[in-house]
């Protein structure tokens, strides 16, 4: 949702740092965005834009745990890098040894 709110070169930054990659969204994350987009206000509009941005992403299934646990599990299972602005999720992922991409000053940074 942050990318929708603050247009950025994050995809170009990631291609520059990683080379070609396949963006993936978990179905539970997509469902969470759909739920957020059904409300009114700024957050709903940003969720809708985020869904549009992710419309071409591959969708992977979730197993039924909470969304953050599913993201962590998928990252570990696939050896994936996770893009998030959720500080708590990023902290958890880092302790698990997962590389996290976040935005700082409109640019992608890896931690």
Image (cartoon, rainbow, N blue to C red):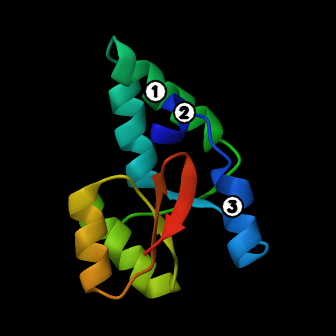
Q: Position of residue 36 (x, y in %)?
A: 34, 29
User: In the rendered image, is residue 66 in sight?
Assistant: no
Q: Which badge, 3 or 2, comes first in the chain's sequence?
A: 2
Q: Position of residue 95 (x, y in %)?
A: 24, 84
Callout 3: SS: helix
Residue designated by label 3: 13
Left or right, 19 with reference to 107 = right
Residue designated by label 1: 46
Label disc, if present, on residue 20 of the rendered structure: none
Label disc, if present, on residue 4 of the rendered structure: 2
Seen at 37% across and 17% down, the residue is 42
Numbered disc in front, either 3 or 2: 3
Q: Position of residue 96 (x, y in %)?
A: 29, 86
Seen at 68% across and 61% down, the residue is 13
Say which quarter of the image contains residue 23.
Answer: bottom right
Q: Which badge, 1 or 2, comes first in the chain's sequence?
A: 2
Above-or-below relation of 25 to 75: above
Say which quarter of the image contains residue 55.
Answer: top right
Above-or-below relation of 18 to 76: above
């Amino acid at each position: 949702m942050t990318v929708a709110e603050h247009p950025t070169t994050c995809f170009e930054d990631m291609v520059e740092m990683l080379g070609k990659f396949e963006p993936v969204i978990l179905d539970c994350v997509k469902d969470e965005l759909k739920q957020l987009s059904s409300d009114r206000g700024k957050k709903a509009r940003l969720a809708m834009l985020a869904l549009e941005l992710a419309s071409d992403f591959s969708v992977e299934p979730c197993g039924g745990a909470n969304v953050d646990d599913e993201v962590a599990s998928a990252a570990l299972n696939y050896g994936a890098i996770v893009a998030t602005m959720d500080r708590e999720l990023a902290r958890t992922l880092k302790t698990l040894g997962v590389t996290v991409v976040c935005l700082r000053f409109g640019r992608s940074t890896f931690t």
